[in-house]
Image (cartoon, coloured by chain):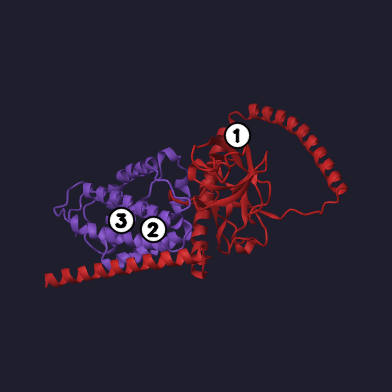
């Protein structure tokens, strides 16, 4: 149920990102709520359900994005392992840590992507576009906290946990990762 | 008890890391040994299903945009109408000259007893989605194998070359744009018929490779397809030369090409239904 709902939400976000969001001017950058969902799932779900969900997203991306079959499941699984490793170091679940987690995961994913494309197309290596990446990082930093709250609310509803006073304005007593 | 849970988590993490590493090695082996692959049945089904969602969202967005554009364009429609009438009159004259030139061409071709070759049929398709990453340049169109589209078919607009079909499902296809870093097209410099290969470099367009330093090429020279790659028909516009750099070292020039099409503004594409494509 949980995996199914997150998967459906992810596919819906993917459709939005490949259609409506493409109409935004490039200087405005393009939001990537799906990436935030990926990081959220990898950070909050248990190892095997989380890995399964990430793998499913990877398989969907693999059909639509890029040129090489099998690239995205691998990149996403690697990202999942990276976030699992990071989550051992980040035990506090507060906005600054969430933003740090999403931004470092974004850099990691692009770095892995860059390495793979360099390996697979050595005759025409891609360019590392700092300008685009910095704009993306800025947008991710802005949208991470509200999206983490929304996804957290969905997760709480689906896993029948007590809703975590997300929109009440009051701070949670437990600041650590549950 | 707590120690056991921690140990079990550690084992799971190492197991997952091991599986991922194994998959990476398998992926590298598969890709380097087999190249680009066709979609299998589940992939086609997912591509179709998500493609329908994209088509729905795109048509809703486009309709809303059209309503807004129609309203704003009404504001200065009279001025535009006058301008268009003037343009129409000018183009009628140009068209007459063009028809005359075609007639002359046909007459001369008959005189030279050239073999008549009919152009390949074409199909118009609408873009329903775009690649959201910064690493690849692909778009999705609302035509697929049920419309006669196959992998490797050339995709163009009236302005010039757009790319080629990469994957197909029954009702949708993925198009690899010519400015993708994995794309390469055999081309000619129109004025002196020198051969070269253009490779995509993303938003900046293309880079023209393998043009010797002795070859005369200047800014604004037109680049067209050579037809030798077995994908694109000969003579389609690719773009114009935007810069030429001759380094002291090396045999070749470094040439940048400004694409003939604006990849950011693409909406409708033309697929040339060419059989016997060499691309597999």
Q: Which residue is mark 2?
A: A10
Secondary structure at numbered mark 3: helix
- The residue at 14%/72% (across/down) is B4
Q: Which residue is mark 3?
A: A39
Asked whether the beta carbons under mark 3 and mark 2 sit within 8 Å of each other, the answer is no
Q: Which chain is red?
A: B
Q: Position of residue A160 (x, y in %)?
A: 25, 64
Looking at the image, residue B175 lies above or below residue A28: below
Of the 4 image quadrants, the one containing the C terminus of chain B is bottom right
Looking at the image, residue B279 lies above or below residue B135: below
Residue B111 as seen in the image, left or right of residue B83: right
Q: Residues within 10 Å of mark 3 (few under 14, many from 20)?
A: many
Of the 4 image quadrants, the one containing the N terminus of chain B is bottom left
Q: Is residue A43 visible?
A: no
Q: Which of the two residues, B273 or B238, is positioned nearer the viewer here?
A: B238
Q: Which residue is mark 1?
A: B218
Q: Position of residue A105 (x, y in %)?
A: 30, 53
């Amino acid at each position: 149920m949980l995996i199914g709902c997150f998967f459906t939400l992810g596919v819906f976000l993917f459709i939005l990102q490949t259609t409506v969001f493409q109409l935004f001017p490039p200087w405005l950058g393009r939001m990537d709520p799906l990436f935030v969902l990926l990081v959220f799932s990898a950070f909050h779900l248990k190892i095997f359900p989380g890995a399964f969900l990430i793998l499913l997203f990877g398989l969907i991306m693999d059909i639509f994005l890029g040129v090489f079959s099998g690239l995205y499941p691998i990149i996403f699984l690697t990202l999942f392992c990276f976030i699992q490793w990071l989550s051992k170091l980040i035990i506090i679940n507060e906005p600054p840590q969430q933003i740090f987690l999403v931004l470092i995961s974004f850099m990691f994913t692009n770095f892995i992507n860059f390495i793979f494309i360099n390996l697979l197309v050595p005759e025409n290596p891609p360019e590392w576009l700092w300008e685009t990446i910095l704009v993306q990082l800025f947008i991710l930093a802005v949208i991470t906290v509200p999206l983490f709250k929304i996804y957290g609310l969905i997760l709480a509803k689906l896993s029948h946990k007590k809703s975590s006073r997300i929109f009440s304005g009051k701070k949670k007593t437990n600041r650590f990762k549950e | 008890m707590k120690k056991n849970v921690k140990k079990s988590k550690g084992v799971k993490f190492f197991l997952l890391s091991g599986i991922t590493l194994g998959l990476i090695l398998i992926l590298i082996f598969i890709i380097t040994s087999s190249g680009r692959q066709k979609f299998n049945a589940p992939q086609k089904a997912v591509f179709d299903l998500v493609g329908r969602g994209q088509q729905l969202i795109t048509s809703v967005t486009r309709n809303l945009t059209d309503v807004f554009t129609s309203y704003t364009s009404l504001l200065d429609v009279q001025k535009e109408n006058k301008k268009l009438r003037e343009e129409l009159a000018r183009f009628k004259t140009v068209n007459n000259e063009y028809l005359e030139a075609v007639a002359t061409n046909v007459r001369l071709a008959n005189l030279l007893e050239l073999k008549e070759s009919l152009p390949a049929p074409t199909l118009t398709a609408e873009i329903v989605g775009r690649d959201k990453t910064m690493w690849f340049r692909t778009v999705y169109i609302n035509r697929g194998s049920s419309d006669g589209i196959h992998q490797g078919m050339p995709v163009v607009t009236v302005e010039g070359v757009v790319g080629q079909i990469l994957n197909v499902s029954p009702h949708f296809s993925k198009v690899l744009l010519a400015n993708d870093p994995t794309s390469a097209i055999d081309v000619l410099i129109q004025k002196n018929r020198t051969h070269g290969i253009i490779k995509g470099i993303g938003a900046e367009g293309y880079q023209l490779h393998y043009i010797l330093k002795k070859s005369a090429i200047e800014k604004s020279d037109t680049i067209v397809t050579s037809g030798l790659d077995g994908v694109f028909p000969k003579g389609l516009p690719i773009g114009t030369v935007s810069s030429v750099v001759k380094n002291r070292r090396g045999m070749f020039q470094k040439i940048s090409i400004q694409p003939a099409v604006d990849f950011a503004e693409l909406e409708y594409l033309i697929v040339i239904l060419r059989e016997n494509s060499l691309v597999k």
